[in-house]
Each structure stands twice: as C-alpha cells, then as structure tokens.
C-alpha cells in the first residue's frame, strides 16, 4: 500500500451541495430558501421559536433544586489514612483536619473534612474531623480507635 492509494470507503464522503450557483444546479436563485421572509435572510437564528406556540422548553415542568448555601466537604477514606499512618506522614494518636492537610492526604479543607469508610483501618487512630459516615465511625471503633465529629452535621 502506498500513500497515494489511500482513500475512504465508497460512500463515506459526499460532495458539498453548492447552493445559489445558477439554475442548472437545482438550487439556484433563492438557494432553497423560498421568497422573502425572516428565514430567507442571513444572520437569523430562530432556535426555540415554534410560530407563536408555547415553546417546548417552557411547556415542560421544571424539577430539582440546588441549595445555594450547601456545604461542600473534602472527603478522605480510611484506607488513605491508614496508608499515610504506615508511611509515617500521620501520627495515629492525633489525626486532625490540619494534620491531614499538612500530610497531603487532603488538598484543602473546604467546609470541613468528611471521613468515609472505604478501605481498611488497622491501627488504633484518634481522628477529629467535621463529618464522618456511620460506617467509618464503626470501622474506627472496631480497629480500637475513636472518631470524633466536631461540627453538628445534618443527618445523612
């Protein structure tokens, strides 16, 4: 095979329709736009307009709501905390939000740090954070440590 022998599959490409190029083309003169009117002019975009009928986007019901004052928590899993304790980057006796940020386990605090239960925690760690899942609290207690939630967290 040579470079000049490369080509598309038959029917994969079509020639561009050249409108307004004379009567022989079948799309001459008005180029298939009819006579006069808004749609025959250039620079017109009537995207959601349905001829005076109530547009579809206004007929459909609106659903959902995004709380403007919702809290965004930085999350960290128990497996990550265990890995950092084993690497010596975290002290198991005192795992706080500031310690997690300083060690690099969490990038930034946001509205607080929330501990989730993914992964295994084998060392007895004392963790103090803004929020935690119930499974994470149980897993830390099972490993012989304690997990304290500082801020009052909404029931999740």
Image (cartoon, rainbow, N blue to C red):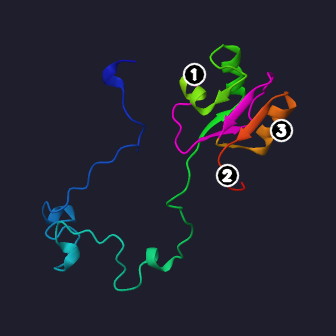
Whole-percent x and y of residue 3? 33, 20
**SS at circle 3:** helix
Q: Quadrant of the C terminus?
A: bottom right
Q: Residue at x 52, y 31 (%)?
A: 107
Tag 1, which secondary structure? helix
Q: Is residue 1 above or below residue 35?
A: above
Instruction: Quickly name the residue at label 1.
Output: 103
Give the image quarter of residue 36: bottom left
Looking at marks 3 and 1 on the same chain, the residue that comes earlier in the sequence is marked by 1
Which residue in the structure is indicated by mark 2?
153
Where does the N terminus fall, quadrant-wise? top left
Q: Secondary structure at mark 2?
A: loop
Disc 3 target residue: 138
Look at 66% across and 13% down and name the residue there: 87
Q: What is the CA distance from the residue labelled 3 to the residue labelled 1?
A: 24 Å
**Dots 3 and 1: beta carbons under 8 Å?**
no
Give x and y (percent) for residue 135.
80, 41
Cα gap from disc 2 to disc 3, whole angstroms: 17 Å
Query: Could you tell me how far apart the alpha carbons at marks 2 and 1 are, in whole angstroms?
Result: 25 Å
Mark 2 or mark 1: which comes first in sequence?
1
Q: Does the magenta stretch mainly form a helix, a strand or a loop?
A: loop
Q: 52 or 23: which is nearer to us?
A: 52
Camera sees residue 34 = no
> Which of label 2 and label 3 is nearer to you?
2
Q: Which residues are drawn in magenta? A: 103-129
Is-magenta flag for residue 117? yes
């Amino acid at each position: 095979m040579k470079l000049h022998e490369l080509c598309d599959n038959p029917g994969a490409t079509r020639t561009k329709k050249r409108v307004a190029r004379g009567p022989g083309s079948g799309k001459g003169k008005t180029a298939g736009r009819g006579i006069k009117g808004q749609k025959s002019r250039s620079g017109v975009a009537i995207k959601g307009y349905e001829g005076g009928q109530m547009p579809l986007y206004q007929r459909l019901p609106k659903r959902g709501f995004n709380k403007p004052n919702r809290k965004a928590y930085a999350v960290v899993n128990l497996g990550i905390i265990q890995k950092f304790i084993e690497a010596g980057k975290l002290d198991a006796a005192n795992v706080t939000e500031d310690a997690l940020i300083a060690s690099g386990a969490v990038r930034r605090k946001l509205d607080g740090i929330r501990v989730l239960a993914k992964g295994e925690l084998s060392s007895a760690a004392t963790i103090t954070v803004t929020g935690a899942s119930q499974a994470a609290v149980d897993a830390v207690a099972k490993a012989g440590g304690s997990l304290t939630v500082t801020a009052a967290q909404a029931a999740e």
